[in-house]
Amino acid sequence: MKTATITRLRDHLRGILDEVRNGETVEILHRRVPIARLVPVEPTPAGAAGRLPPWLDRLRRAGVVRVGTLKPVPEILRGFPRGIRRRKGNLGVDAVLEERKRGR
């Protein structure tokens, strides 16, 4: 494991990040005391498409966020009930304009 001071990290960030990208772990020191560790990100398995990213899953397990269970919008719109006509335009705006015409 390599080490770097805060000053070296500040001055050579790009090179240090290249080392981390290549699999090296770098420990950051402040006055010779370790304060942080830069480690490479674990690759996501190919079968994980559609799953939550690890950072979001940790937040979900900690109860910080809740993940929605709804289908994506295009799937919802495809399942629009038969027999109901979709109107073009905005129904709310149309209602306000109609009230203005009536003089309310």
Image (cartoon, rainbow, N blue to C red):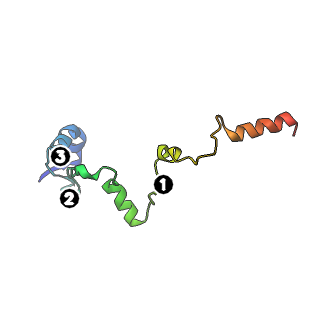
Give the secondary structure at mark 2.
strand
Position in image of residue 12 (x %, y %): 20, 39
- Cα separation, mark 3 vs mark 2, equals 20 Å
Position in image of residue 37 (x %, y %): 21, 55
| The C terminus: image quadrant | top right
Quarter of the view holding residue 9: top left
Q: Residue at x 38, y 60 (%)?
A: 59
What amino acid is found at the position of numbered circle 1 in the picture? Leu
What amino acid is found at the position of numbered circle 3 in the picture? Val
Q: Residues within 10 Å of mark 1 (few under 14, many from 20)?
A: few
Q: Is residue 103 visible?
A: yes
Task: Kindly identify which numbered label has been placed on residue 33.
Answer: 2
Give the secondary structure at mark 3.
helix
- Give the answer, above or below, for where 79 lies relative to 87: below
N-terminal label among 3 and 1 = 3
- Label 1: which residue? 70
**Mark 3 or mark 1: which is in front?**
1
- Give the answer, above or below, for where 38 lies relative to 61: above
